[in-house]
Image: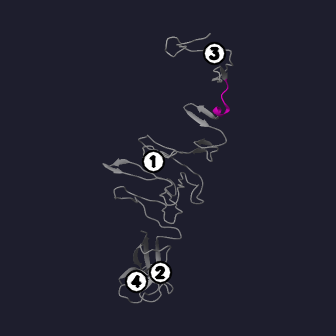
Amino acid sequence: GYFQDFTGSALALKTQGALQFMGIGEAANKVLTSNATGTATWQNLPGSATSWTVSGADIYNSNAGNVGVGVSPSPFAKFHARRLDNIFYSPIATVGAIYGENGSTNNGSGVLGVSGSPRTGSFSYAGVTGQNVANSGTDAFGVIGTSEGTSSGGVYSAGVGGYGDYGVLGYSQSATGAGVIAQHSSGKTALEVNNGFIKVSGTNKTAFKHTTTAGNTPGGDYTNLSYDSPSINDIIIVTHNYTPNNTYLNKTTGVFWTGTTWAIYLEDQTAMPVNISFNVIVIKQ
């Protein structure tokens, strides 16, 4: 039959209840598909549509390759999402390619990353890794974490959380950058160490022990410090350490910039003895 609307309702056919289309390839799990002229037939699902499996309230993908959103032609991870728009200074500008939100009032994370890989370099072994490939000369942060809540009537903010041997690892390859930046918007506490210690490790330590020797005491009342990239803008904190060599230093000390490095000197301008140890902390500005 042929149906045509003469009432102006824009509906040529209106039904109440189920419809049945027979004789056009009907079978279980087929979809009704139209060709270019509008002729409908029952067709099998496209092969790409069967990659997803429904299991109760869940849906999952069991293909051997990767899944991409906004990625062409081929994603390089099991799930690869890319955001290509250039929207700035708007409510959605901070969303990024993937947005994770946890609405639980008890516990949980917006995004949880788990890795069983041991540390082998600067990244690619962590549960969550962030990398920013912005042009040089711009502020580039791999991961930024913020949180807002109330505790005893006050507002607190927390950064990126981690669980394992190292809660958070910050790594920078820039000569002027930093692995981790802690910042407070109103100039209050930017970094709090709760129930623990600060540990300084590596080959280029910002806190170290310095012992005077004939080599670093070139005569006079001072001893030269040795650390990477000294600057006149550095802040040097020094205390005498009796323990290593069991030597007293009953003199007032200070520090000064020699033109190439920092040095510890004796205020009374007497000769600096050897085998005297100092605890040194360097704070970069």
Q: Quadrant of residue 58?
A: top right
Going by the image, does 26 lie left or right of 267?
right
Residue marked by disc 4: 265
In the image, residue 45 sits, relative to residue 236, either above or below, namely above
User: Closer to the observer: label 4 or label 2?
Assistant: 4
Please say if the residues under marks 3 and 4 sit with CB atoms less than 8 Å apart: no
Q: CA distance from mark 2 to mark 3?
A: 92 Å
The residue carrying pointer 2 sits among few (fewer than 14), some (14 to 19) or many (20 or more) residues within 10 Å by Cα, namely some
Q: Position of residue 145 (x, y in %)?
A: 45, 51
- Start-end of magenta stretch: 43-50
Q: Which of pointers 1 and 4 lies earlier in the amino acid sequence?
A: 1
Residue marked by disc 3: 21
- Three-letter residue code for mark 4: Tyr
Residue marked by disc 1: 88
User: Closer to the observer: label 1 or label 3?
Assistant: 1
The residue carrying pointer 3 sits among few (fewer than 14), some (14 to 19) or many (20 or more) residues within 10 Å by Cα, namely few
Going by the image, does 13 lie left or right of 36?
left
Q: CA distance from mark 4 to mark 2?
A: 13 Å
Q: Which of pointers 1 and 3 lies earlier in the amino acid sequence?
A: 3
- Three-letter residue code for mark 2: Thr
Going by the image, does 72 lie left or right of 153?
right
The residue carrying pointer 1 sits among few (fewer than 14), some (14 to 19) or many (20 or more) residues within 10 Å by Cα, namely few
In the image, residue 160 sits, relative to residue 265, either above or below, namely above
User: Closer to the observer: label 2 or label 3?
Assistant: 3
Q: How is the image coloured?
A: one colour
Going by the image, does 237 lie left or right of 55?
left
| Dot label at residue 205 | none
- Three-letter residue code for mark 1: Phe
Q: Seen from this angle, which residue lies furthest top?
A: 1
